[in-house]
Image: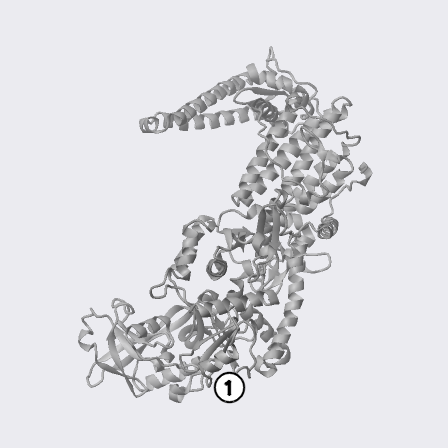
């Protein structure tokens, strides 16, 4: 490639379009299970097909792609399994909302199959959009293996798992109190509820004690539920009510009498009146109280949130209407004692955004705790996987959330009253006998059954059963519910690899290597994958779990479309490029809990307004910087000839940069091993921008112009660009591939000490390994050059010296420092635009000069006629004052007997050395002030 063919500017879009297609066409992302290379596998946390990806998805997928590209370069057989989640409740909620807004219809107007067909169409549209976004960001997924939680492969795994759980007695159906979404008419999990503070009231109601003149005063925030009260609880030690325990109260407006019970768990006698109404059917704490005290349960609400016939005169009304009428009736009857304002936390469904109602409902559950006489149950087994170290969570603090949640050993409600999802594979028959079942399903190991609690039989089958499967006189009816979305998601690490079949992919890649996810689904997803992985395969689903930070805006608010502070990663790619997006997110992936990105609105040339952040300019600037310096390097590779490089014979600057590169390789590799993405990104930026771009390239320019030194300089330069492309590729794949391909025609063979043919693509190039190159003398020498060059530049800038002014700096130093500076004289002169450099102390100090007093040298910049003498003297005095302030602090510390006697000896000695250094600088500055008149 000639210099004219190297584009002057880096075009992110052109690079993205060209090289992503190139990688896909070459099969760079496709994993071969027959390979003898060590396996490395990540299953993508499947995005919900509810809409487009957001910045949090971009962060997580950037992290996963960094890991996959890095391990691929290290020689692993890498499989990044892509796919999407059907997201049962969320997707159905969106489609139902759209249906009502556009057609004023409900799902019941459409019917089950018609609604499901609508949702499939939605899924196809948004899945294409989501997968396209992942490609746009450069994600190197194995697209040939894309899975969907409702596809045939995953559905088969769901059926097999359910059947195995049913056979093992781990699944049961029961009427339990659940969180109920009255709009979607389905149960929702505890983790799918968000809480908001709302302004409400506490109503105090008088409950007369039957047959006496006494009454209990009961305070409640939900007076409408008193229609379902089955007791009033007091503390067993409360002297105010001990004499009433066991008596009855007349429940106002109902004509019912309910007992006064003692319950020290439910009641805090120091709070309120010390009397608590117990409504087991509509409060989780009351439900547990009812179980402890064998109380009856009254179910007040229908699935749509209206009150049931048991509510009498209030039947058919919703909760708000019941409250309004009930309060009026209580006041009219003289039962309402007082009303006080109160702020309460109200739970809302994360999907419909409506208030949650606790109600009893028939649901399917998986037992999490131990059965009687059984070895550790599911929850304990999952806890053991982490405490034993078979699964490691990073950062470690998140293991506590995992263990605490599992430690509650709450049974998992797996049924949802929806139409979109995996239909529960249970059929019931009320008329058949076991002989009928044995006759119909003889020889089938995919069908099993057990008696139903209410009579008849429950039949589990891995294949659909026709209604007439048992013959004339018997009808099989399938359960109408679907499984909780997290049921199929919990199978993701092994279902996507083909389980229950022993596929080549399952044998090669299970257990998977790493899971990267957010902290809010540690319980919903991570814990359940560990449970199902161990149950189905006998092994954990992954070895490491990385919890990435949650992205917030600059004010610490979670980003969302509704809040108007969301950032679309597609917009960022369009404006800044995919590399800039990835770089900025990787740089922010620290071990902190949250990542704050200030958001600002930007108007595009076409009139669109989008949200963006100046943070992404860092990534664009770095990509451009690397491109520009690589281009400069390539422009100096004309006539490149391979040949040996004897490292020990290289000039100081080459040995310095190679030692720094070797350390960078080792440290970056260690960072990625430990999931320190921010540290790895920052280190690569600092080395590339500062050491390579700002220093080494300048050092190398003169040798590249000299025909004698040019060949070796070219080989070292090509090697540096080559290795930096490799190191940066996992983070910034497109600009590195663009440079790599541009280098191919100029330096097809690269390396130090020997050149070898470069791989066709940096995507599949070998990850560099540290060679143990260290050179303390080269590092110390170049550090001296850098410090003095910076000192001269600073003096020139501080005094506003014209760029073309003829300057002749004087650097006074002794011993090894002087020798190192003389060795770098050409760089000192050239990189400061100096006419000459002197290392001999002047016989007479220049009267007008800018001076920098360093620890081991003094830099004098003669500036006769270019500076203000009084201003220079004032600066010297300020410098002296700063030095004396630092010295005062050190003298106080060293004069403190407690510090000197207790601090480690090396710490005390370091403080004394620092004081001596400051004292030397003080003497030098005083001399300068005296000489300035």
- Residue 616 image point, x, y percent: 63, 49
Residue bearing mark 1: 474
Q: Quadrant of residue 647?
A: top right
User: In the visual, does 239 lie left or right of 58?
Assistant: left
Q: Is residue 570 visible?
A: no
In which quarter of the view is residue 739 placed? top right
Q: Residue at x 31, y 87 (%)?
A: 333
Left/right of residue 24 with respect to residue 248 in the rendered view = right
Q: Residue at x 39, y 68 (%)?
A: 343
Rendered position, 498 above or below 187: above
Query: Within the image, what quadrant is residue 95 found in?
Result: bottom right
In the displayed structure, 475 sits above or below 683; it is below
- Residue placed at 33% from the left, 71% from the top? 288
**Where residue 469 sits in the image (x, y, percent)?**
55, 81
Quadrant location of the C terminus in the rendered image: top right
Total marks drawn?
1
Q: Position of residue 179 (x, y in %)?
A: 44, 72
Against 1, residue 97 (above or below) is below
- Is 45 placed left or right of 328 in the picture? right
Q: Position of residue 592 (x, y in %)?
A: 49, 48
Asked if residue 359 shows in the view, the reply is yes
- Foreground of the two, 906 or 804: 906
Residue displayed at 30% across by 78% down: 295
Mark 1 crowdedness (10 Å alpha carbons): few <14, some 14-19, many ≥20: some
Give the farthest residue toward the top.
843
Instruction: Determine the secondary structure under disc 1.
Output: loop
Q: Front-most of 338 and 587?
A: 587
Q: How is the image coloured?
A: one colour
Location of the N terminus by quadrant is: top right
């Amino acid at each position: 490639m000639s210099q004219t063919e190297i584009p002057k500017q880096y075009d992110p879009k052109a690079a993205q379009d060209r090289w992503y297609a190139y990688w896909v066409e070459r099969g760079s992302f496709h994993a071969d299970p027959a390979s003898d290379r060590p396996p490395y596998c990540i299953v993508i946390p499947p995005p919900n097909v509810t809409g487009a990806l957001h910045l949090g998805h971009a962060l997580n997928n950037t992290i996963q792609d960094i890991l996959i590209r890095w391990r691929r370069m290290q020689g692993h057989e890498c499989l990044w399994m892509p796919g999407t989640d059907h997201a049962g409740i969320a997707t159905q909620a969106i489609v139902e909302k759209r249906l009502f807004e556009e057609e004023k219809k409900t799902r019941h107007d459409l019917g089950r199959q018609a609604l499901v067909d609508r949702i499939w169409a939605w899924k196809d549209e948004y899945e294409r959009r989501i997968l396209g976004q992942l490609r746009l960001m450069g994600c190197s997924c194995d697209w040939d293996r894309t899975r969907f939680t409702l596809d045939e492969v995953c559905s088969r795994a769901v059926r097999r798992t359910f059947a195995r759980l049913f056979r093992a007695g781990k699944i049961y159906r029961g009427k339990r109190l659940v969180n109920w979404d009255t709009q979607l008419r389905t149960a929702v999990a505890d983790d799918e509820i968000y809480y908001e503070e709302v302004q409400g009231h506490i109503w105090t109601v008088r409950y007369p004690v039957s047959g006496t003149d006494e009454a209990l005063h009961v305070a409640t925030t939900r007076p409408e539920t008193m229609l379902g009260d089955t007791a009033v609880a007091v503390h067993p030690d409360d002297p105010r009510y001990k004499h009433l325990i066991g008596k009855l109260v007349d429940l106002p407006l109902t004509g019912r009498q309910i007992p006064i019970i003692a319950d020290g768990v439910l009641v805090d006698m120091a709070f309120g009146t010390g009397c608590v109404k117990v409504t087991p059917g509509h409060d989780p704490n009351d439900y547990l109280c009812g179980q402890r005290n064998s109380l009856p349960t009254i179910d007040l609400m229908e699935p749509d949130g209206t009150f049931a016939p048991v509510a009498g005169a209030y039947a058919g009304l919703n909760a708000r209407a019941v409250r309004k009428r009930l309060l009026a009736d209580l006041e009219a009857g003289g039962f309402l004692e007082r009303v006080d304002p109160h702020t309460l936390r109200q739970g809302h469904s994360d999907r419909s955004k409506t208030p949650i109602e606790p109600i009893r409902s028939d649901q399917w559950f998986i037992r999490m705790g131990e059965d009687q006489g059984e070895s550790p149950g599911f929850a304990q087994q999952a806890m053991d996987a982490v405490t034993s170290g078979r699964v490691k969570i990073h950062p470690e603090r998140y293991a506590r959330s995992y263990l605490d949640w599992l430690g509650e050993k709450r049974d998992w409600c797996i049924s949802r009253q929806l139409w979109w999802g995996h239909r529960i594979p249970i059929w019931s028959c009320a008329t058949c006998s076991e002989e009928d079942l044995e006759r119909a399903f003889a020889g089938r190991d995919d069908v099993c059954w057990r008696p139903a609690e209410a009579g008849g039989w429950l039949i589990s089958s891995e294949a659909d059963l026709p209604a007439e499967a048992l013959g004339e006189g018997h009808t099989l009816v399938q359960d109408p519910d679907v499984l909780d979305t997290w049921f199929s998601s919990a199978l993701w690490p092994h279902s996507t690899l083909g389980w229950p079949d022993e596929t080549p992919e399952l044998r090669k890649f299970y257990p998977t290597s790493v899971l990267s996810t957010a902290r809010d689904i540690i319980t919903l997803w991570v814990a359940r994958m560990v449970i199902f992985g161990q149950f189905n395969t006998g092994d954990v689903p992954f070895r490491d779990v990385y919890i990435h930070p949650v992205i917030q805006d600059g004010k610490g608010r979670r980003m969302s479309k509704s809040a108007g502070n969301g950032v679309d990663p597609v917009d960022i790619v369009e404006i800044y490029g995919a590399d800039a997006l990835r770089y900025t997110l990787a740089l922010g992936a620290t071990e902190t809990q949250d990542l704050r990105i200030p958001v600002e609105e930007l108007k595009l040339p076409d009139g669109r307004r989008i949200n963006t952040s100046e943070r992404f300019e860092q990534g664009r600037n770095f990509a451009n910087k690397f491109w520009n310096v690589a281009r400069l390097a390539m422009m100096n590779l004309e006539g490149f000839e391979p040949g040996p490089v004897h490292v020990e014979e290289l000039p100081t600057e080459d040995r310095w940069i190679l030692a720094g590169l070797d350390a960078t390789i080792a440290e970056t590799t260690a960072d990625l091993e430990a999931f320190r993405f921010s540290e790895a990104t920052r280190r690569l930026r600092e080395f590339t921008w500062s050491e390579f771009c700002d220093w080494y390239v300048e050092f190398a320019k003169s040798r590249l112009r000299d025909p004698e030194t040019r060949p070796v300089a070219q080989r070292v330069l090509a090697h540096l660009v080559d290795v930096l492309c490799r190191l940066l590729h996992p983070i910034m794949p497109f600009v590195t591939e663009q440079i790599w391909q541009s280098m191919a025609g100029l330096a097809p063979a690269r390396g130090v000490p020997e050149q070898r043919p470069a791989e066709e693509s940096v995507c599949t190039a070998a990850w560099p390994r540290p060679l143990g190159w260290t050179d303390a003398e080269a590092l110390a020498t170049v550090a001296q050059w850098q410090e003095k060059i910076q000192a001269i530049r600073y003096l020139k800038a501080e005094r506003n010296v014209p760029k073309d002014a003829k300057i002749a700096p004087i650097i006074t130093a002794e011993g090894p420092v002087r020798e190192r500076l003389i060795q770098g004289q050409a760089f000192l002169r050239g990189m400061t635009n100096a006419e000459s450099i002197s290392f001999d102390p002047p016989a007479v100090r220049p009267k007008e000069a800018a001076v920098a007093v360093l620890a081991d040298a003094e830099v004098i910049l003669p500036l006769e006629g270019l500076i203000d003498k009084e201003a220079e003297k004032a600066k010297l005095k300020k410098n002296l004052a700063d030095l004396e302030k630092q010295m005062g602090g050190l003298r106080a510390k060293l004069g403190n007997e407690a510090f000197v006697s207790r601090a480690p000896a090396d710490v005390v000695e370091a403080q004394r050395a620092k004081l001596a250094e400051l004292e030397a600088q003080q003497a030098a500055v005083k001399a300068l002030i005296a000489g300035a008149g």
